[in-house]
Image (cartoon, grey):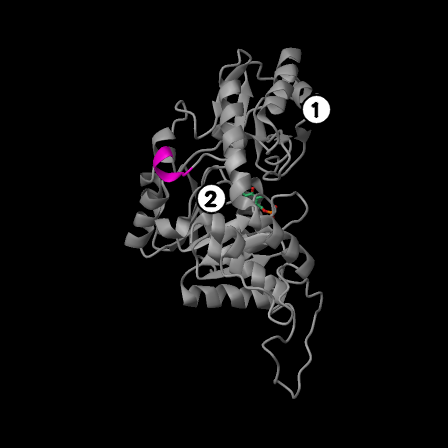
């Protein structure tokens, strides 16, 4: 089944009782039993819920995975993965991670004796060099947030396999429309389904997709035992969102390229970070690995002051100044004071999150309107 079909039909069936084409919202916490322990496969909704089951199947299908799991947020999904490990275990992660992932690793799990190394994964050799006898997993995000650095997934999973390590890939920015990390050798794919998978800025949700049955059992046990599930109403919304993922991503990518090209040619813009531009330092890897380049980009102004960035952000009309990304509407964000404020300033500057860095989530509006909006604010500064 091709991707355009898979997002709509993959591992899905009509509801058997009535033929209902959309899976109903099973808004229930519990299920009747005819005799203790005798039931139709459902006992309690923390464990299983038919609406969540349908969504978890859809999640598995779009990432070419055997199993999918849905959580109350992207961070809850990451939390579930990290709970596979024990004190003294070591995890290698990229140095340009989603701020909340970095915060969870350094502020929560380091208290429980897990250790983390953050390396620049642009060069996979940095990963190999960071491996110690306690290393258990490589956590990889590509393209990264907010600088859109691209990591060669195959190169990293090869190193992981040679060293018996698990590789987990946060595929939130790319989505399965652009690449499927499991097909490139990863063991776990993670999504903040809040973003492109949901696609309409109306829910907060996380997803994990895996092929290995034993790994799925371990993760499912943690999902059940720790309890960070998503509810039936949100599951329904995400199921509906996934159906248009392919067509939305096609437009996101088209608009992303147009906006990136416009910005790159603008005299007030210092630098544009978009993997589809030939000027991008990882363009060759991006071209090899990505089927298209998506809707996320960031740029720096020649005037590198916070005042210039704020003026631009305050005067946008079509773009909304907001956290988050991946919805149908275009959003703009100031990483150093918003999404990435949890990273200490010296770290932030070291990785290039400067005062004038602006991140855009390019939506599926008409690109002409998006470009006109950016043009009018760039004229102001
Ligand atoms: C938003 C995001 C997360 C966290 O997901 P939530 O749904 O907000 O908990 C993790 N990784 C990336 C790349 C994100 O953009």
Q: CA distance from mark 1 to mark 2?
A: 29 Å
Is residue 113 visible in the rendered image? The answer is no
User: x, y (%) of residue 40?
Assistant: 60, 79
Return the residue at label 1: 317
Q: Quick one: label 1, few (<14), some, or many (20+) residues within 10 Å?
A: some
The quadrant of the rendering that contains the C terminus is: top right
Residue lying at 33% horizontally and 40% vertically, measured from the top left: 124
8 falls in the magenta region: no
Residue at the extreme bottom:
35
Q: Mark 1: is the Cβ under 8 angstroms from ligand 1?
A: no
Return the residue at label 2: 177
Above or below for 171 versus 20: above
Q: Quick one: label 2, few (<14), some, or many (20+) residues within 10 Å?
A: many
Quadrant of the image where one finds ligand 1: top right
User: x, y (%) of residue 3?
Assistant: 45, 48
The quadrant holding residue 16 is bottom right
Is residue 88 visible in the rendered image? The answer is yes
Nearer the observer, 273 or 361 = 361
User: x, y (%) of residue 289?
Assistant: 37, 39
Above or below for 92 versus 323: below
* 175 displayed left or right of 377: left
Q: Mark 2: is the Cβ under 8 angstroms from ligand 1?
A: no
Highlighted range, magenta: 287-291
SS at mark 1? loop
User: x, y (%) of residue 305?
Assistant: 61, 17
């Amino acid at each position: 089944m091709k991707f355009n079909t898979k997002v709509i039909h993959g591992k899905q069936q009509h509801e058997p009782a009535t033929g209902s084409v959309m899976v109903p919202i099973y808004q229930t916490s519990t299920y009747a039993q005819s005799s203790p322990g005798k039931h139709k496969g459902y006992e309690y909704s923390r464990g299983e819920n038919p609406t969540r089951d349908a969504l978890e199947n859809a999640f598995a299908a779009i990432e070419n995975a055997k199993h999918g799991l849905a959580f109350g947020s992207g961070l809850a999904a990451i939390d579930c993965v990290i709970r596979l490990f024990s004190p003294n275990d070591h995890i290698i992660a990229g140095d340009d991670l989603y701020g909340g992932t970095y915060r969870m690793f350094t502020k929560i799990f380091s208290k429980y004796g897990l250790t983390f190394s953050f390396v620049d994964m642009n060069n996979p050799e940095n990963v190999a060099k960071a491996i110690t006898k306690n290393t258990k997993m490589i956590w990889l995000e590509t393209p990264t947030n907010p600088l859109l650095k691209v990591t060669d997934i195959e190169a990293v999973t090869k190193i992981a396999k040679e060293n018996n390590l698990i590789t987990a890939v946060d595929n939130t920015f790319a989505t399965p429309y652009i690449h499927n990390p499991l097909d490139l050798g990863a063991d776990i794919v993670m999504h903040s389904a809040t973003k492109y998978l949901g696609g309409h800025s109306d829910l907060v949700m996380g997803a994990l997709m895996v092929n290995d049955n034993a790994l799925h059992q371990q993760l499912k046990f943690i999902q059940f035992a720790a309890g960070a599930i998503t509810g039936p109403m949100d599951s329904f919304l995400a199921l509906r969102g996934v159906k248009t993922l392919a067509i939305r991503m096609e437009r996101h990518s088209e608009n992303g390229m147009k906006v990136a090209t416009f910005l790159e040619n603008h005299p007030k813009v210092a630098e544009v970070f978009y993997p589809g531009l030939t000027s991008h330092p990882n363009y060759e890897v991006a071209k090899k690995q990505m089927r298209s380049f998506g809707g996320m980009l960031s740029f720096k102004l020649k005037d590198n002051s916070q005042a210039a960035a704020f003026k631009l952000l305050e005067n946008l009309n079509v773009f909304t100044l907001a956290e988050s990304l991946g919805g149908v509407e275009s959003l703009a964000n100031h990483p150093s004071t918003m999404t990435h404020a949890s990273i200490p300033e010296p770290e932030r500057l070291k990785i290039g999150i400067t005062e004038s860095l602006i991140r855009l989530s390019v939506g599926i509006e008409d690109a002409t309107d998006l470009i006109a909006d950016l043009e009018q604010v760039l004229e102001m500064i």
